[in-house]
Image: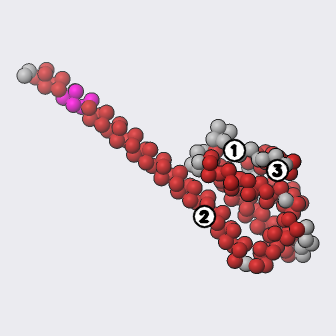
Amino acid sequence: MTLGDLGDLGDFLGGIGVIVTLVYLAIQIRTNTQTVRAASLEAVVNSHSQFLDRLASDAEVCRIWYSGLWAGAELTAEEGQRLLTLLFSAVRRWESAFYNVRTGTVEHSSWIGLHREYTSVFASAGAAARWPLIRLTLSREFLPFAEEAIQEHQRGDRPSPVTQAE
């Protein structure tokens, strides 16, 4: 075996090493992507669950939420402010989930139910009355999407869930 043959063998083994390294990196990237998606979904779900837990654990807050949104009840000024604060909190959760879906960190199928729930809340009479204040805080990307979804819900159409392509 000549020195040239050994050089060729070294090049061949080096090429195999590069291929093995690339396969290993592809597997690691896929695993990391799956981990990021799972963590993002868990964060979205936990945030929403904490909000619902807060409603369920405080009878007064729950009464303000449901009667202020759907029952057409007259709220005191303080109750109206509490409802507005809850709506600001809810819209931030909706907007966060929207961006997670747009960036692909939350699967579209995981988003649909949450999106419909938020759309129902913001299409209610109580939220609609407060929407002029809420909409001022939303991003340029999310505002048209939210308003279209709310209008579709109010017309009786199913809201169009965001897709990754948007």
Q: Is residue 17 magenta?
A: no
Helix, strand or loop at label 1? It is loop
Q: Is residue 13 magenta?
A: yes
Quadrant of the rendered structure where residue 20 is? Answer: top left
Which residue is pictured at 82% across the width and 46% down the height?
Answer: 157
Is residue 23 positioned above or below 119 on the image?
above
In-front residue for pair 146/72: 72
The crowd level at tag 3 (other Cα within 10 Å; few <14, some 14-19, many 20+) is some
The crowd level at tag 1 (other Cα within 10 Å; few <14, some 14-19, many 20+) is some
Reading the chain from its start, which is encountered first: label 1 or label 3? 3
Residues shaded magenta: 10-15
Give the percent coordinates (x, y) of residue 134. 81, 58
In-front residue for pair 95/67: 67
Give the percent coordinates (x, y) of residue 109. 62, 48
Residue that label 3 marks:
153
Reading the chain from its start, which is encountered first: label 3 or label 2? 2
Residue that label 1 marks:
162
Reading the chain from its start, which is encountered first: label 1 or label 2? 2
